[in-house]
Structure formats: C-alpha cells, structure tokens
Image: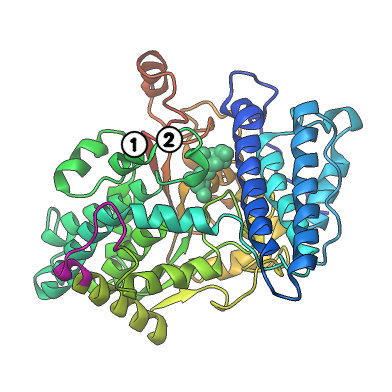
Amino acid sequence: MVQLFKLPYDRVSPKDKDSFAYTTLVKRWPTILTGVINTVTNINHELHSSSSPDAQAQIEEGKQIVAKISAMKHEMGRNTPLPLIEDDGEGNVQCYNEEIETFPEEERGWSKVNWLFAECYVYRRLRSFFAVTQHWKIFDPFFQSKADTYRSSSGAIIHLAKALNAMVEQKDLLDRSDEPGSPLEIAFMEMIQADLWGNATDLSLLVDLKYEDLQKLQAVGAAAQAEQAKLILRNDLDKAWAHIKSLKNGRVDIVMDNAGFELYTDFIFADFLISCTPFVSEIVFHGKAIPWFVSDVLPYDFTWAIDSLLDRDFFASASTPPTAEDTENLVTLASRWKSHLASGKFRLSVPTDTPLGLAQTDSLGGFWTTQYAYQDLPEAAPQVLAELQKADLVVFKGDLNYRKLIGDAWWPTTTPFDEALGPLAGKITLLSLRTNKADTIAGLAEGIAERLDKEDASWRVSGKYAVVSFSSRK
Ligand code: F6P
Ligand code: MG
C-alpha cells in the first residue's frame, strides 16, 4: 500500500460548510449526476422505438445504471459511509478501496472524507456503473455536452486559428528573435495566456455559469489578455519563457484538463512551440482513461477535436458561424495538426484508439484517474514519473491538476509553491496553468489573499482569477 505524503495542513473537506467543497457536495454533484441520469433515460426512450435486437437488453442495463446513480445521490444526501467500489475488471479499484479502508468507520460519510478523495471517487464509481455493462461500456455520458460547448466557442476558435496561422506564415520573422520583448516573446505570451484562460471553460462549473459568461472568459486578442493578466495572482510566465528559450529540440508534456475549447487552446500553444520556435520539437499529451470531472479529455475527444475542425459543417449551426475564409483557416490549422500527429511531433501518451477504462494505476493511461495527489506520484507511480522525467517541461493544466499538485490542502496562501509540491518538488520541471476554481492555493505574495478576501469573497473559486506557477528540476 502506498505511503501517502504527510501533509502539514488539513485537506479541504465538505465538513467546512463555508468551503466550495460543501457547495459541491450538496449542489453540484447532485446536479451533475441528475444530468447523467437524464442522458441515459433519454437514450432509453429512443431505444424503445429501435428495431435493434439488442435494444431491450440495453434498455434494461440503462435502467440499472440509472438506479445505481440514484442510489449514490441518495447516499450523498443522507451522508452514509462510502461503499467500496465494485470490482468491474478495470484499473484503479484497489487504490480507492484500500484508502477507504484506512478511514475510521465513523469518518467514512460523504461529508466527512476529504473533498479530493470523494470527488475522484464519484467519477471512478460512476465509471463502474457503465463498465460492468455490455451495451454501455464505451459510453461517455458527457460527450454531447463537451461537443456542444466546443461548437459554442466558435468565435474564439476562429480568432485563434487566424492568429496562429498568420504567425506560422511569418515564422522567419519570429525565428531566433529571442531577445527580451521580441516579437517571439510577445507571441509566446499571447499563446500561453490563451491556453491558461481556456481552462475557464469547464463544464462542471456550468452548473453556475451561463454560456455568455463563458464566452467572456475565453480571452483572446492582446487587449483582452492585457486586461486578464491583471487577474493572474502569481505569474511565473517569464520564468517559463526563460526555460523554454534555453531548450533545443526539447520535449514538452501537457497533462491535459478539459476537452473542447481548452483542448483546442492546448493544441494552439503546442503548435506555436513546434511551428514558430526553434526550441521544441515534440509535444506529448496526457489524457484521462475514464469520463472524468465532466469535461476532461478522453482519447476519443483528442482526435475528435481535430476532425471536427476539418468537418466543414461542424460550426455551421454555431452562434458565430465561420465565413468561407474562416473555414479555410480552420482546415489549414487542423491539417497541420494532423501532420504533427503523423510525424510524431504531437503524440498522445497512449494509442489514440485506446478504449475507455482499461488502465492500471502505475500506467500512463491510469494514474491520472486515481485519487492520488501528485505529491504521492513518486511513490504511487514511479513509471509515470520516469516518463515525465523524459520531458524538458511538464505543463499541468487546470484546477484539479493544481489541487493534486499541492494536495488540496489549506496551505497558508504565502507558502512557497515548491514547499507545497512536497516530494514532487525538484523531480521534474513543471508549469501549472490554473484558473482558480477551488479553495486551495499557495505561492501568493504577502497581502494578496487579505486584499481579495475584502474585495471579492469568491476569488478562490469563481474562475475569474488565475495562478501560473513554475518549479525547476533540481
Ligand atoms: O468540482 C470542483 C472541481 O474539482 C473544481 O476544482 C473545479 O471547479 C472543477 O471541478 C474542475 O476544474 P478543472 O476542469 O479546471 O480541473
Ligand atoms: Mg477538468
């Protein structure tokens, strides 16, 4: 059994009724689970008029899934102890169940266990309801919502496609101009900030957010980004740029977060590094093995996002449909990404046709859907660490990755980021790009948290603010 890093501070827990964790337990998880019930029920309705010989069996399995999700919602409401995850034949059952058994009996209730564990458990257990079926085994209940949000982001998608294609065309201007304030540096800052704010597009937060709000968060263009930069509470982008400039034919790994628009901005940033700079020649993308925190990237989402850009009809029904010229820009962009995939300049860490669910804990496909904080990565998944150490830089995207980097604990906000990384500090060179959507935070300068507590009570969780945190390999 993995010896977990001993945190000097408590983990965030729904026990604290003022925490976002508590709101999540009483409001957000039930809403998300009800959405999954509706999705399965709607498909079951359609199956009633299907002539497929398997329809009846699939309907029955669908009903069982709905019953299990309803039971889990009921448990949450009544705060009963977390049951062990059933052995569904897939990876990562043991790691969850072993940890549950370490919690004292009276501390196993939904509002008693720490938030990071409980939330990862929700998605792993949800997966088990589908994994044990025959007809729903490869079904992703969140796919449609990911696809709809991607389509509704067409305005920002087109803007970024034009901006990057123009840069790639003027590549000679950008090449080798690596002095401070150079066009290349300005372009880097624009592309990486698009990738940072792409994280604001998080479907699990859409419980509280409208599409219009979301479009405002997709900051693109220099003016919007200058405005947004004021909201970055700790900003290590200069350090990241200095490191990237020191590379030659480097490898950058991206531990991805959300599908759709955020994934698109990951590709934009990755393509910028490959096509416009002499510093990086390989990008390795790491995704999830099972449907995760609603919007995270699965192998299927990864290739689907590129194929949709090549489908000239995909954005036709969007609120900002592309012009003929825009469509050409999207096709040029996506064709370049296809060729990066074919040449190995872009690579998913597992085969792109990997089916949902099969991965084991200490594997590239499996580790990211365990409950482990990344402080425990060296102990829990040494093979994954060894693979990440082949990279010159590992970029961790998004809020959950940030929570896992610092163990989702109540660190004093001025704790140095390296200290909060615990045993992971110094093992890899990493950059975390996170918009703030959860209570935990570290690495801030004196006085920032106190000022924001007075000015904007929701600053830790609203997604309006961000932190960019860099740490070097020693
Ligand atoms: O449910 C809460 C949460 O874990 C928050 O941390 C965050 O709002 C979201 O889910 C996941 O965010 P991200 O997609 O940025 O990791
Ligand atoms: Mg996510």
What predominant SS class does the magenta segment belong to?
Answer: loop
Closer to us: 61 or 278: 61
Q: Horizontal placement of 99 versus 175: left or right?
A: right
| Disc 2 + disc 1, Cβ < 8 Å | yes
Residue 456: percent from the left, percent from the top?
38, 19
Q: Horizontal placement of 32 versus 163: left or right?
A: right
Q: Horizontal placement of 199 versus 218: left or right?
A: right
Q: Residue at x 61, y 75 (%)?
A: 354
Q: Residue furthest right?
A: 105
Q: For residue 209, which numbered disc appears in the image?
A: 2
Q: Which residues are magenta?
A: 316-327
The 10 Å Cα crowd at callout 1, few under 14, some 14 to 19, many 20 or more, is few
The 10 Å Cα crowd at callout 2, few under 14, some 14 to 19, many 20 or more, is some
Q: Is residue 261 magenta?
A: no
Q: Is residue 319 magenta?
A: yes
Q: Residue at x 41, y 60 (%)?
A: 263
Residue 466: percent from the left, percent from the top?
38, 38
Q: Amino acid at mark 1?
A: Asp
Quarter of the image for residue 310 reads bottom left
Closer to us: 52 or 378: 52
Q: Residue at x 27, y 64 (%)?
A: 245
Residue under numbered circle 1 = 213
In the depicted structure, whether residue 16 falls above or below residue 411: above
Q: Amino acid at mark 2?
A: Leu
